[in-house]
Amino acid sequence: MSTFFGSVWWMIVSLGVLVTFHEFGHFWVARRSGVRVLRFSVGFGKPLWLRRGKDGTEYAIAAIPLGGYVRMLDEREGDVAPEEVEQAFNRKPVGRRIAIVAAGPLANLLLCVALLWAMFVIGRPDYAPVVGQAEGIAAQAGLHRGDTLLAVGDRATPTWSEALVALSGAAIDRHDIAISVRDADGHQAARTLPLASLPAGFDDTRALEAIGLTPRFRLVPPVVGRIATGTPAWGVLAEHDRVTAIDGAPVAAFEDIGPLLQRVGGHQVMIEVQRDGERLALEVTPRLQRDARGSRWLLGIEPAPVSQPPYDATLRYGPVAAVPAAVRETWKLASDSLSMIGRLVTGHASVANVSGPITIARYANASAQLGVAWFLNFLALLSLTLAIMNLLPIPVLDGGHLLYYLIELAKGSPLSERAMAVGQYIGLALLAGLMGLAFFNDILLLVR
């Protein structure tokens, strides 16, 4: 399956599952609140399948699978027979209407917990939170290759994914943060990352690069790939040579070669390599190259293409331990999401962090390719995002309706239809602007 069709397919599957649960939340509470449900539809548009239940509700699967809806009996949307008035949504006490509207986001929240529980039981493969290279701020904090990140702030980091989320949030806030590490010799130590020294306006979508951290699994093996014609390495090194040392200094990754060459400068250097099972010592003199990035001593080699390394860690719990773990993870994800919304509103985070359906579809496809556990993790995060977004106090969303009902509780009477209509227009304008920004970011990312 191509990337395009795979992204479309997994996007439809993801939204189909999540929206169905969301609408079922509205449906279930509405029925138990005495409201007559006219139609429960998965998808929009013309029904492809339609069945009327014994309760009189129409159950439909529609042609456009990117959503769904629950249509309830409501005097504001059409004539209602006198004998059915008491089953109309608008005739119910405000408390019941609040419960019905809030049930959709709550269903997504509960689904998030259930999906995370399943993910923990299955076990999510990941990378160990081991430092591969530390430069800049990371080096200033005393981090070194081989250090394992145990915690960032008060958040445990059993895998690199948890470390990445914690470090990214702290970098955006630009607050110094304490980290707990275990060095290559097994000794635990405390370090402080001076994130307050990050430059203003740094690209917060590439926080690790700004911090100067490279995870171990991202290091490139020191294997020679293409050799540029006429460069110092031409005719001396060969493709597939594995560089093991430069002037006696060990080389564990391709990233080590550059700094060692800068240390040597223009002097002749002894490079030790492994070639076809033999150890060779070769003499090469680096050449100075000047370009827009400055002056550097180079050999003229590029790394050999590498594939994604295998996972070396698994995040897993037993069926019982996975329950509190799923609740804690849901709380952490919700806290991270709300914090990011706050940063976006206050301008502390770039609007480039706002993603639209194209990026979501790509992530859906990528997570599905990584296995069941990663796809469950993606579904859980998306379900939580839907819950939070729907609770935002924007008219036309569930949160907007809840805002109307809370105002009704406070003033003792419903808002006027004119006030609600104005709110609907404002809500549509806000949603249109948000969707436009999300699509712009998606397209810009594709172009890049």
Image: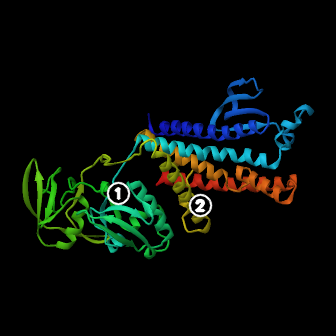
Mark 2 Cα within 10 Å, few/some/many (few <14, many 20+)?
some
- The image shows residue 409, relative to residue 64, as above or below, that is below
Q: Residue at x 56, y 37 (%)?
A: 12
Measuring from the top left, give residue 184's x and y in whole percent.
24, 62
Q: Residue at x 32, y 55 (%)?
A: 218
Measuring from the top left, give residue 270's x and y in whole percent.
10, 65
Q: Which is more toward the observer, 385 or 221?
A: 385
Q: Residue at x 36, y 61 (%)?
A: 150
- Would residue 117 be found to the left or right of residue 32 on screen? left
Q: Amino acid at mark 2?
A: Ile
Is residue 308 visible from the viewing direction of this image? yes
Measuring from the top left, give residue 41's x and y in whole percent.
69, 33
Q: Amino acid at mark 1?
A: Pro
Q: Secondary structure at mark 2?
A: helix
Of badges 1 and 2, nearer the viewer stands 1
Q: Which is more toward the observer, 314 or 227?
A: 314
Provide the residue designation for mark 1. Answer: 129
Q: Which mark is residue 341?
A: 2
Q: Which mark is residue 385?
A: none
Is residue 397 visible from the viewing direction of this image? no
Q: Residue at x 71, y 33 (%)?
A: 40
- Would residue 164 be found to the left or right of residue 383 on screen? left
Mark 1 or mark 2: whose residue is earlier in sequence = 1
Q: CA distance from mark 1 to mark 2?
A: 27 Å
Q: Secondary structure at mark 1?
A: loop
Identify the image quadrant of residue 410. bottom right
- The image shows residue 394, relative to residue 180, as above or below, that is above
Measuring from the top left, give residue 73's x and y in whole percent.
82, 36
Identify the image quadrant of residue 43. top right
Q: Quadrant of the N terminus?
A: top left
Identify the image quadrant of residue 78. top right
Mark 1 Cα within 10 Å, few/some/many (few <14, many 20+)?
many
